[in-house]
Image (cartoon, coloured by chain):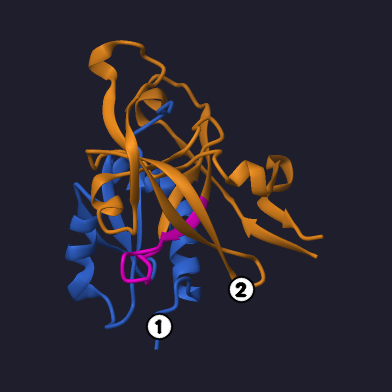
Amino acid sequence: MAQKIFTEQGKRDFEWLVTHAQELVRMYPDQWVAVYRGEVVGVGKSGEDALQQAKDRIEPGDRPVVNFVEGGAYVY
Amino acid sequence: MSTRIPLAFEEFLDPHWAQQGITALITRLVVRVAFVTPDGGSTEERKAVFDTGAPVALLPLGLWQRCAVTIKGESVLRGVIRKRECELPVQIGEVTCHLPAEDGSTVSVPLTAYLAPVEDIALLLGCDRLLGRFQVVIDRPHKAAYLEELSD
């Protein structure tokens, strides 16, 4: 069976990322994080590094939500 | 009938500003997104910044290398600082993103994207295709924001 793209868990983890932005900016500026079940389970210089770190900390078949943590007030 | 894709307001203080007593909030409009991979599957979900100041999407190296991508050409990414040393050479390509709609369905949108040669950049979704297809509603006082596709 094809893996579901967006899950309820993913929605909760996305919301966790949004509500914990301040804490993440302080702890992981300019780094990639992987979040699963309301917890940072991977940190790295790339999203793929963060995913790799997260591998052993998530249920088989599940996937974390990955995000780049901005270090401050960047203008793009 | 319409399809709505929720956006969220992410807000934080710049730590360096805060040390100086500057309390202006950094506000980003963010969205859940995944991308189509070469085998027809999708990447993991990511949080992207919806940036109406960006003409096209911007994908970091590790991500776009795992996507189904058609390279169209190359360019230079320029920002607010016009110095040559602040330019970033990029490729331009076509990718397809998935966005989750409010009703539980998934909307697929082909996007033109800057394909960056570096990792330490935010994932951005720019205007291309999105503004042409969706109305953008941003109502910060009521904490409501979404992209809305109206069907005939």
Q: Which chain is orange?
A: B
Q: Nearer the viewer, mark 2 or mark 1?
A: 1
The residue labelled by disc 2 is B104
Q: Position of residue B47 (x, y in %)?
A: 43, 53
Quadrant (top left, top right, bottom left, bottom right) of the N terminus of chain B: bottom right
- Residue beneath the point at 39% across and 66% down: A38
Element type at mark 2: loop
SS under mark 1: loop
* Residue B114 left/right relative to B129: left
Residue B44 drawn in magenta:
yes
Q: Main secondary structure of the magenta part?
A: loop
Image chain in blue:
A
User: Residue at horizontal 46%, vertical 57%?
Assistant: B97
Which percent across, then down, holds residue A55? 20, 71
- Judging from the image, mark 2 belongs to the subunit labelled B
At label 2, the amino acid type is Gly
Res. B87 in view: yes
Location of residue B20 by image quarter: top left
The residue segment tinted magenta is B31-45
Check residue B75 in the rendering and tell me which mark sits there, or answer none.
none
Between the residue at mark 2 and the residue at mark 1, the CA separation in whole angstroms equals: 16 Å
Residue that badge 1 annotates: A2
Which residue sits at x=30%, y=51%? B64
Q: Chain of mark 1?
A: A
Q: Is residue B17 above or below residue B27?
A: above
Labels 2 and 1 touching (C-beta < 8 A): no
Whole-percent x, y for residue B8 in the image? 57, 51
Q: For the residue carrying disc 2, how many other residues have a C-alpha within 10 Å: few (<14), some (14-19), or many (20+)?
A: few
